[in-house]
């Protein structure tokens, strides 16, 4: 659909030939529509009176209000302001619009933040297959939450004059036609995205769904225990643990556990032959009742379980069906109904229930990693992180978030409240060993990463069990793909660098300086890196690699701490941990097709501070060449 850049605008009162500017607007809610709109260019948007005036946008912006009314008059439609809404301090306009031989009845509701945000238009009596919310019946007159709406230029009449005919034309055309493809945004709009659900409710579903040949079955779920204060609300959040057929045979089982989902719940699932088509009332209660009736009529086992349920018991009804989850591509989707028994059934009296629709959240590994496909190779990788302080702790969180499959976490210290100014986690973990604190956190937040915490004091003469600390550390190292040293301890780094060299493992280290004014990130990959950690030390000493910035000053010894520590905050030192995380990921997936791209350097030195002032991070990188004084790299 094309239009000239300027012309006499048909929705401007006669005699006012104002040039117009083409504005591309796209539809949202239902299937998105792409079509140009001609928006009138009016004087700059300005308010009259004080900003704090709360009497309605039409009083704050009277010129905009007059423009809306004039444009509707020029459109030639019949319209009136809803007096009941007006008395309540809201603006809603009822419209009768003639298009061809058809007359359409619409209602436009304006937000109080108008004209910064557009009105919502509902079409009554007519049901469209596309570009109309299947439940609320509001039209899709803008896309992407209205981001293309231009305050001070666009009007309701402008949308109705230009977009509404295109909506009707698209609905009259074949879905597979070029006309539809040209005018629609290529984004899937699944039915589940339009269903009204409580934002505090969801059920995580796996990547797999039952085969289409199976009509229904049973569910096993782990859900979050509901707080007593919320007992009057039906809040269900959790995950599917198993999907069975009606005979109890397992179809899909999920090994992942989330400690927060500590309460077991059962339910039933039903495969629908097609995408749900709901012609009932737009009220959420009636929509929920529709799905309850559908489950009861389709699965007698559910009806029987509901009849036997006691007051307070909740059953889950799951519905799986094919839907367009990607534009013109179909796949299975889920929708759930939570059913809580208020009064149990007796004889012929049905149970009295409370209903709540619950959205599905795709949480399988494939669905989880779709947002970052370059990280998929990490699902088969294992790392050992030694040192879980201000640098190691945020690095561990970054690696878990990236999807590293397994982490061995090593430290000998426990968390103090004072650490939290630069540690990755907060007060609730104070008093715990750092490795165990991170283990607990990751079990809740990143269950696809397996964590093994270890309390090891490298260099100690104390043995634990049948193995010395050295033997345990070496055994752990042998099973890992990368050794990460975040100890900032020269002796430990010397030991780990040599151990990694002996085992043929990549070695990565990171440090920061006093005041967290600068930092270093480096790595050695056997067979690829020309230099080593000892070469790096020599190059720092001769100045061929610059020293990071240091704010100077003395170390401090906080109360309850047995040794001195540096001064610095996490908002600075996190920069070092972040780059080290990226370098670790690049090292782990190096060579994998489509994997996270590698860096063309092996050492980076950062300054965050200069001449007493904070600066934007400045990184200097180096390939880390062999140093002639390094005995390791120049031995015969």
Image (spheres, rainbow, N blue to C red):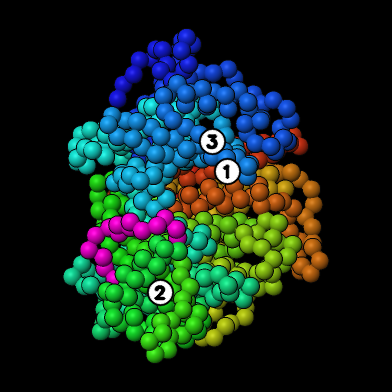
> Distance between the Cα atoms at labels 3 and 1?
8 Å
Residue 551 versus residue 470: which sits nearer the camera?
551
Secondary element at image label 1: helix
Residue 413 falls within the magenta-colored stretch: no
Residue 286 versus residue 189: which sits nearer the camera?
286
Tell me the residue at 52%/27% (across/down): 68
**Residue 585 has which mark?**
none
Total count of labels: 3
What is the chief secondary structure element of the magenta stretch? loop
Tell me the residue at 62%/59% (across/down): 424
**Residue 81 has which mark?**
3
Magenta region: which residues? 270-284
Secondary element at image label 3: strand
> Distance between the Cα atoms at labels 2 and 3?
44 Å
Tell me the residue at 69%/25% (across/down): 48
Tag 2 residue:
316
Asked whether the viewer can see residue 434, the reply is yes
**Residue 85 has which mark?**
1
Residue 106 drawn above or below residue 432: above
Residue 412 drawn above or below residue 597: below
Tell me the residue at 57%/40% (across/down): 83
Asked whether the viewer can see residue 380, the reply is no
Q: Nearer the viewer, mark 2 or mark 3?
A: 3
Residues at discs 3 and 1 in contact (Cβ within 8 Å): yes
């Amino acid at each position: 659909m094309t239009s000239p850049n300027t012309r006499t605008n048909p929705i401007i009162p006669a005699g006012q030939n104002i040039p117009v500017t083409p504005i591309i607007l796209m539809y949202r809610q239902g299937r998105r529509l792409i079509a140009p709109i001609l928006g009138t260019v009016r004087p700059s948007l300005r308010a009259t009176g004080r900003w704090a005036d709360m009497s309605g946008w039409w009083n704050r912006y009277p010129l905009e209000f007059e423009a809306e009314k004039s444009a509707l008059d020029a459109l030639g439609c019949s319209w009136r302001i809803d007096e009941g809404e007006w008395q309540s301090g809201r603006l809603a306009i009822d419209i009768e619009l003639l298009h061809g031989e058809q007359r359409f009845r619409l209602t436009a509701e304006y937000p109080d933040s108008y004209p910064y945000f557009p009105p919502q238009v509902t079409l009554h009596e007519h049901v469209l297959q596309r570009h109309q919310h299947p439940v609320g019946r509001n039209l899709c007159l803008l896309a992407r939450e209205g981001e293309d709406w231009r305050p001070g230029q666009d009007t309701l009449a402008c949308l109705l004059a230009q977009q509404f005919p295109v909506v009707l034309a698209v609905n009259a055309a074949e879905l597979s036609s070029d006309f539809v493809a040209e005018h629609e945004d290529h984004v899937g709009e699944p039915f589940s995205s339009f269903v009204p659900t409580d934002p505090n409710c969801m059920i995580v579903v796996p990547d797999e769904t039952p085969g289409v040949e199976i009509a229904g079955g049973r569910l096993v779920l782990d859900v979050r225990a509901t707080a007593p204060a919320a007992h009057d609300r039906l809040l269900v959040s959790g995950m599917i643990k198993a999907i069975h057929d009606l005979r109890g045979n397992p179809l899909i089982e999920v090994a992942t556990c989330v400690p927060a989902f500590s309460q077991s719940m059962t339910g039933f699932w039903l495969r629908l032959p097609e995408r749900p088509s709901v012609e009932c009332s737009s009220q959420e209660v009636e929509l929920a009742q529709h799905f309850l009736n559908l489950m009861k009529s389709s699965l007698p086992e559910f009806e029987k379980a509901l009849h036997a349920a006691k007051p307070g018991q909740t059953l889950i009804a799951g519905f799986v069906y094919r839907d367009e989850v990607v534009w013109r591509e179909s796949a299975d989707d889920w929708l759930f109904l939570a059913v809580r028994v208020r009064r149990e059934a007796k004889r012929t009296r049905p149970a009295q229930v409370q209903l709540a629709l619950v959205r599905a959240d795709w949480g399988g590994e494939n669905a989880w990693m779709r947002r970052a496909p370059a990280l998929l190779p990490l699902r088969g990788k294992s790392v050992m992180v030694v040192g879980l302080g201000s640098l190691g702790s945020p690095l561990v969180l970054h690696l878990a978030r990236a999807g590293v499959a397994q982490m061995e976490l090593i430290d000998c210290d426990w968390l103090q409240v004072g650490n939290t100014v630069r540690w990755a986690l907060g007060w609730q973990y104070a008093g715990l060993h750092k490795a165990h604190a991170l283990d607990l956190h990751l079990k809740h937040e990143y269950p696809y990463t397996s964590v093994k915490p270890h309390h090891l004091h490298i260099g100690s003469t104390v043995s634990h069990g049948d193995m010395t600390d050295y033997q345990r550390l070496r055994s752990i190292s042998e099973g890992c793909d990368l050794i990460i040293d975040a100890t900032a301890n020269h002796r430990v780094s010397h030991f780990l660098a040599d151990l990694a060299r002996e085992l043929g493992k990549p070695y990565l280290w990171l440090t920061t300086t006093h005041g967290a004014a600068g930092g270093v990130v480096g790595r050695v990959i056997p067979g690829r890196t020309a230099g080593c950690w000892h070469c790096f030390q020599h190059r720092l000493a001769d100045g061929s690699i610059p020293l990071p910035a240091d704010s100077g000053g003395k170390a401090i010894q906080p109360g309850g701490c047995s040794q001195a520590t540096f001064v610095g905050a996490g908002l600075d030192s996190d920069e070092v941990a972040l780059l080290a995380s990226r370098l670790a990921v690049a090292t782990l997936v190096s060579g994998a097709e489509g994997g996270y791209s590698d860096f063309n350097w092996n050492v980076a030195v950062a300054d965050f501070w200069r001449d007493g002032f904070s600066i934007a991070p400045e990184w200097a990188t180096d390939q880390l060449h062999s140093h002639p004084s390094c005995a390791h790299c120049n031995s015969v």
